[in-house]
Image (cartoon, grey):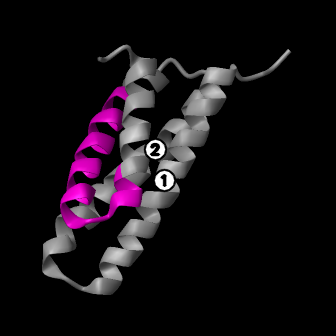
Amino acid sequence: MSMIEDQTKQLIDILGDCFAKCAACVQDCAEQGREDLAGCIRLCSDCADLCQACIPLLARGSQYATELCRLCAEACERCAQECERTGMSECAQACHKAAEACRQLSGVA
């Protein structure tokens, strides 16, 4: 018997990947030092923090996981849009995937 359902494990993996891609994107943007990337840095930081916060709640089956995932989906989608605008396609793809997975869990279409 698995302690964590397969769907939850998959979401945790997706969120972990999004966290890593956002953290790398923040670093890349910061190293470029361009003022037009400030919004990308902020959104990626928020997205990474929310993805990271969702993981332990999901793992322990917290009653708050669904609501936090709804918020995470919103942040991931906004981050994806900004990363697309700034040409950070790898991060944008990870964010879109995380947003979709979180929306499925939280029942938001």
> Which residue reaches farthest left?
36
Mark 1 closeness class: few <14, some 14–19, many ≥20 residues within 10 Å: many
- Secondary element at tag 2: helix
Residue indicated by mark 1: 19
Q: Where is mark 2, residue-wise? A: 51
Left or right: residue 77 compared with residue 14: left
Residue 88 magenta-drawn?
yes
Q: Which residues are magenta?
A: 68-92
Residue drawn at 37 percent across, 13 percent down: 107
Q: In the figure, is residue 108 to the left or right of 86?
A: right
Position of 7 with respect to 38 (left or right) is right
Q: Is residue 6 above or below residue 91?
A: above
Residue 12 image-quadrant placement: top right
Residue nearest the viewer, comparing 6 with 48? 6
Residue type highlighted by circle 1? Phe
Q: Where residue 109 is drawn, which disc sits there?
A: none
Asked whether 21 falls inside the magenta stretch, the response is no
How many C-alpha atoms fall within 10 Å of the one at disc 2: few (<14), some, or many (≥20)?
Answer: many
